[in-house]
Image (spheres, rainbow, N blue to C red):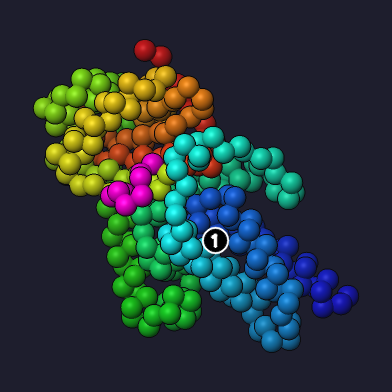
Amino acid sequence: MNDYTWLAQRFEAERSNLRAVAYRLLGRFDEVDDAVQETWLRLSGSDPSSIANLGAWLMTVIARVCLDMLRARRARREESLEASVTAPITSREDGIDPEEDAELADSVGLALLVVLNTLAPAERLAFVLHDIFSVPFDEIAPIVERSPTATRQLASRARRRVRGSAIGQDTDLASQRAVVDAFLAASREGSFDALLAVLDPDVVLRSDRAAVSRGAARELHGAQAVARVARAARLLLGRTRFAQPVLVDGTVGIVMTPQEGLLLLLCLTIRHDRIVAINVVADPVHLHQLHLVVLPD
């Protein structure tokens, strides 16, 4: 067996783990496989005798590849929402089982993915590698070009953001539905007072990149700020074919659909009959991974 064949076999054995790392770092399947392929290209052009621990070497390489991709994503001009919504979903030709993608998406969870997408690239990498994949900080530090202490601080900031999003959720679907209906009615009417009545005073609204215009805030805090956004969304509600409650991830959310295809999804966290968090998802890659059940009127 030559070196190339040995590397290829070892790489295939690590592929699933590499995809899991890349998905948590990038959050998009269309970029995950690009990152894995780039990692293979770097491995195939390397000297096997210089690699003492192949698993650790591959983890470092794919982390650096993903970090470069995250930084490039932040730097380049964001695609318009309209262009993203109409982008076709192509069939997979790389031998990856679609069920594997679905399982990987389910293992992360949409709410966590939205929170991860609000983190700076270095914060996201430090948190994902250390807290999810147990990579030591002294191994992460060279990747993010920080000291181990500074890298620990990056992960700590990210951890606080993630923990802050992990708020207890009311499990009674009927009561959730009542809150969602009240929120929709208040948004359609543009009633500021009615919106404040259904929002927790410390509510947090987070939006993915496809849901906000360039330069707009992706995270808002407080009932008044969120109510102003919801009241402004009254015009958007009027242009959509419908805005209707749906069941997503076992809880009630809101889907807003224009004339052609799914526009965006509001994932709501409800506690004590108040909305404490709203995650707005418009990325078509994420939306097409979801299984939504539209709830009857």
Work out whether residue 129 or residue 64 is closer to the camera in this orientation and state it.
Answer: 64
- The amino acid sitting under disc 1 is Val
Q: Residue at x 37, y 63 (%)?
A: 120
* Residue at (38% x, 66% y) in the render: 123
42 lies left or right of 128: right
Which image quadrant: the N terminus? bottom right
- Which of the 4 image quadrants contains residue 206? top left
Residue 174: % across, % down: 31, 21
Mainly helix, strand or loop, the magenta region?
loop
Residue 215 lies in the magenta stretch: yes
Please name whichever residue, 212 or 200, is drawn nearer the observer in this view of the structure: 212
Q: Which sits in the foreground, 117 or 217?
A: 217
- The image quarter containing residue 91 is top right
Q: Residue furthest left?
A: 193
Residue 191: tell me if it is visible: yes
Up the image or down, 150 lies above or below 35; here it is: below
Residue drawn 65% across and 68% down?
39
Magenta range: 211-218
For image coordinates 50% across by 36% down, the residue present is 85
The verdict on residue 16 being magenta is no
- Whole-percent x, y for residue 297 in the image: 36, 12
Name of the residue lying farthest toward the right: 1
Secondary element under disc 1, as helix, strand or loop, is helix
Counting from the top left corner in percent of width and height, residue 101 is at 61, 45
